[in-house]
Image: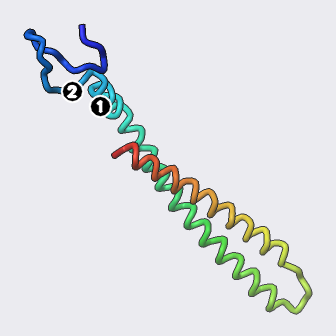
Amino acid sequence: MAGAGSAAVSGAGTPVAGPTGRDLFAEGLLEFLRPAVQQLDSHVHAVRESQVELREQIDNLATELCRINEDQKVALDLDPYVKKLLNARRRVVLVNNILQNAQAWIWVIDN
């Protein structure tokens, strides 16, 4: 009996061209996982889009806080809040980079 990784053999003992058991298993496994990988890719894409929107909103808010701080007649120090926003923005960018790398791996697996 032929092993899972060996080629099929005809009755005369000559090799017969065709996929091996290992190839068939790998193909079946990929087809089984493909819907989950595609769904994961879709979710990662949606999260990346929301991360970009969040980063833009943080930038707008930080700009607005700086403008308010400059326009205030009363001394109100908003710099700590601007720094916190910029730190949050940095973390959003970091998460977005991680998601981008994960999506690249998903694409490699899917193709």
Other-residue count near label 2 (Cα within 10 Å), few / some / many at <14 / 14–19 / ≥20: some
Taking 21 as reference, is 100 above or below it?
A: below
Mark identifier at residue 19: 2
Residue highlighted by disc 1? 27
Residue at 47% from the left image edge and 49% from the top image edge = 43
In contact (CB < 8 Å): disc 2 and disc 1: yes
Q: Amino acid at mark 2?
A: Pro
Element type at mark 2: loop
Residue at 57% from the left image edge and 59% from the top image edge = 97
Mark in the foreground, 2 or 1: 2
**Picture colour scheme:** rainbow
Left or right: residue 34 versus residue 78 is left
Q: Nearer the viewer, residue 14 or 41?
A: 14
The outermost residue toward the right is: 75
Residue at 60% from the left image edge and 72% from the top image edge = 56
Q: Position of residue 67 (x, y in %)?
A: 74, 87
The outermost residue toward the top is: 1
Image quadrant where residue 37 sits = top left
Other-residue count near label 1 (Cα within 10 Å), few / some / many at <14 / 14–19 / ≥20: few
The outermost residue toward the left is: 12
Q: Amino acid at mark 1?
A: Glu
Q: Position of residue 94 (x, y in %)?
A: 64, 60
Residue at 33% from the left image edge and 29% from the top image edge = 26
Element type at mark 1: helix
Image quadrant where residue 33 sits = top left
Tell how many labels: 2
